[in-house]
Structures are given as structure tokens and as C-alpha cells.
Image (cartoon, grey):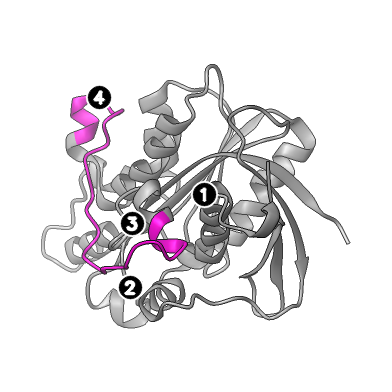
Amino acid sequence: MTVLSAYVEAVGVRGPGLADWPASAAILRGAAPYDKVPTELPPPERLPSAERRRAVPVVRIAFAAAEQAMQMRPIEGPLPTVFASSGGDGLNYHQICETLASDDKKISPTRFHNSVHNAPSGYWSIATRDMATSNVICAHDASFGAGLLDALAQIACDGGHVLLVAYESDYPEPLHSVRPIAASFGMALILAAEPSPHAFARIEVSVGEAAHDTMADAALEALRRGVPSARCLPLLAALAKVAAHDTDTDAPLDQVIEYQRDSSLSVRVIPC
């Protein structure tokens, strides 16, 4: 069995009732109640003003998580990235379909370039002026797991750091009826090949067939089930406990993350 590992140096979270990593960590380790309020989508601070005005919800949710992680752990120099989403910008797809169904079928260049799956990755490269490699992953409901494996494989092969960003934005009707994304949600991890003073946990990940874990809180479990990128919640809960030293004798925590229909990801979170 192949085990991929990396050190976790930073986390970013944005979702319904989850404003940032410190607030989310308290909720996920049971130290604060969860209040499911709509996701706030702040403007992407790193983007130039012209691009910031054009940023669509899926770009905003991806940036909200990624910018948090970069504030927690600024990286000097090139930073490879992995962006993972099950579908991309549903609102933009809806608006394009409306245009194509109208008498005036002219689609604006801005709407067209926002429709591609790698739009958040492209905006991130504009914002950071980073020419490092960026992989963009789509694996339907397994997109978070596929993105995590891709990021860990890069760590194993190339070393250094990788920024993983997994995100979704909800769809309008009638797309929502056939692809019901429950809410906008984004998460980001900065992963490293080597230990450092910034690292607070090491994760070891392997593919298996064990039954996946669920969230004890019913509302958080509904979020985990309803948003593909929120399948990360059991992992984030373990990271929150490790970061707060909320474990017995700093023992490792084991979680099983939902992945594909016939497989899951076994994740061991080891305090640093």
C-alpha cells in the first residue's frame, strides 16, 4: 500500500458559518457552536482592481480560502498549486445558457473566459504573478480527494511546497435541480515536504476501502454531504484538534475521507 505524506503549514476555510480557519477550528473541535449562516464571499484582495471587479463567486470562494492560508504562511518564491472543484462556475454556465437561448447569442469575452474550469487558477497566477506549475482537477464528487492525492504526489516527486485549494459555488435553478451544491465552500492547505517551525501536523494518506467518517454535528454533516469539497471536514476537524493540542498525549488521529464509490482515503494526522 502506497502512503503519501506531507507537513501541514497553513489552513484556510470559508463556508456557511465558517468565516476563517481560527473560527472554523474552534467549531470543528467542539469548542464553539456551529451557526449555519450563508457564506460570505469577500472580494479577492490580491487581484488588481479591474480583475477584482470581474471576479465571479467561484473565484471569490477559492481566493477566500487561499488568501487565508497565504496570510498564515507567506511563501517566498514560486509556489506550485492544485485547484480542485467538481464543476466550477455554475452561475456563469447558467448565464451562458440563457444567452444562447435568447435572440442575441453574443457571449462576452469576460463571460467566456470565466467559464473555463481553470479560471480560479488563472486569476491566482495573475494575483500572485507566480509562474509555478498549477494543476486543475475535476473528479466530480471525488474532486477533493483527487486534489489532495495530486498535491501529495507533487510533494513526493518534487519536494518543496504545494498550495491545495478545493472549492465549490452553488448553482442557480434549473441547474441546481440536477446538481444540488448545497453552499459555496472553499478550503486551502499549504503542504511541505520537510518539517519546519511553521508545520503543526504531518499527514499520511493512502487509498483503501474502509467506511468513511462522518461529522458528529448534524449541520456539519449536511455540509459535508452536500458540497463535494466539504468532504475535507473530517480531516480539518483532526487538524483543528492537533493544532490546539486537543488529543491524548499528542497521539495521532485517524480519519477516513469519502473518495470514490469503491474507495476512500485513510488519513493519519500526526502532531508536530
Question: Looking at the rendered structure, which numbered label has been put on residue 244?
Answer: 1
Mark 3 lies on residue: 89
Q: Amino acid at mark 3?
A: Asp
How many dots with numbers?
4
Residue 106, percent across and down? 18, 51
User: Given the current orientation, which residue lies at the most extreme top position?
Assistant: 77
Residue 5, percent across and down? 75, 47
> Which is in the foreground here, disc 3 or disc 2?
2
Q: Residues within 10 Å of mark 1 (few under 14, many from 20)?
A: few
Quadrant where the C terminus lies? top right
Mark 2 lies on residue: 182
* Mark positioned earlier in the residue sequence (4 or 2): 4
Q: Give the extent of the magenta segment.
A: 26-52
Q: Residues within 10 Å of mark 4 (few under 14, many from 20)?
A: few
* Mark positioned earlier in the residue sequence (1 or 2): 2
How much space separates mark 3 and mark 2, taking CA atoms?
14 Å
User: Relative to 31, does residue 162 appear above or below in the rendering?
Assistant: above
Query: In the image, what residue occupies the spot 41% across and 24% down?
Result: 128
**Do callouts 4 and 3 mark residues in contact (Cβ within 8 Å)?**
no
Question: Looking at the rendered structure, which numbered label has been put on residue 3?
Answer: none
Query: In the image, what residue occupies the spot 68% across and 28% down?
Result: 160
Q: SS at mark 1?
A: loop
Q: Residues within 10 Å of mark 2 (few under 14, many from 20)?
A: some
Is 35 in front, or is 117?
A: 35
Q: Residues within 10 Å of mark 3 (few under 14, many from 20)?
A: many
Q: SS at mark 2?
A: loop
